[in-house]
Image (cartoon, rainbow, N blue to C red):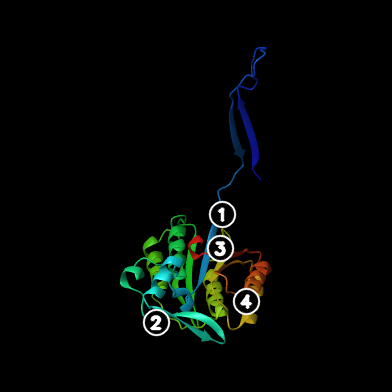
Amino acid sequence: MPILSLDINPPIAALGPQRQPQLCYALLTIGAAGATAAQAVNWAFVADASRSMRIPILDEAQFRAIIRDGGAQETLIDGVPVWQLAASLPPELKATVKSPLDHVARALHALLERLDSADRFALVACAEQALVLVESAPGDGRELLVRGIDELRQVNLGDATDLSTGLRLGLDQLRHGRSSHRTDRLVLLTDGFTEVPEKCLELAARAAAEGVAISTFGLGGEFQEALLTRIADATGGQARLVRRAEDI
C-alpha cells in the first residue's frame, strides 16, 4: 500500500509580531512511496443496437418545427397517444441530430485514447441477435478498434432486444483476453427492455463466479432499471442512469 509523504517549504514560517494580519506562502509537495502503476483492464462492451437506439434525438424546437411542417402526426398505440414521423427527416436536420447509438460510439472512441498495449478491448452489438464487432484485441490497435466501433452504427440485428445474447458473447470475449495482470470489466449499454431478463441474471451470476464486474448504463427513461441494478449489484459493478445520451 502506498505511503504518503508531505514536504513543507519553509518548514517553519518566520513572521515577526505585527498588529496587522500577515500572509505567508508555503510550498506543499505530496509524494507516495511504494506506489504501483494502475492495473491493466480487460474490457468488453455490450451495446444495445436495436431500432430504438437508432432513433434521432430531437430537441423541443426541432420537433415543433417538424410538426409545424406536417412531418409528424399524433396517433394512438395501445391506447396511448404518441407522435410518429410521417416521413424521413429533412436532410439538413438528419445531418445534425444524433441517435443514442451515435453517442455510444462517440464515447467508445474517447475511451480508445486512454487504452494502451496492456489493456484489451472487445465490442459486442446485440438486438434480437448478437454479433462480435471487435474480438478481444490489444488496446493500442487503434485502427482495428475504430473500424469495429464504426460498424456499430450500421449493423442490423433486428428490432427487438435480447440482452442475454450480448452478455453471453461479451463474457466469451473476456475469457479470450483474461490474464492475471488484467482486471475483467464488462459494460452494458441499453435504452430498452430485454425479452428474457432471467437469462441476464443467470449470466450475471456466472460472471460473478468468474470475478467479472458488470457495470450497466440505462439510457433515457424507459428501461428495466431494477434488472440493470440487480446485474450490477450481483457482480460488484455499478448501475448508472443516463437521462441524456450525450452524457455517456
Contact (CB < 8 A) between labels 4 and 3? Answer: no
Numbered badge on residue 86? 2
Task: First in sequence, mark 4 or 3: give its number.
Answer: 3
Contact (CB < 8 A) between labels 4 and 1? Answer: no
Instruction: Give the amino acid type for the residue marked by disc 2 in the picture.
Output: Ala
Contact (CB < 8 A) between labels 1 and 2? Answer: no
Q: CA distance from mark 4 to mark 3?
A: 21 Å
Tell us which disc is closer to us: 4 or 2. 2
Label 4 element class: helix
Q: CA distance from mark 3 to mark 2?
A: 52 Å
Location of mark 3 (residue): 179
The residue that appears at 55% across and 78% down in the rendered structure is 163
The residue that appears at 60% across and 64% down in the rendered structure is 240
Label 2 element class: loop
Contact (CB < 8 A) between labels 4 and 2? Answer: no
Location of mark 4 (residue): 203
Q: CA distance from mark 4 to mark 2?
A: 41 Å
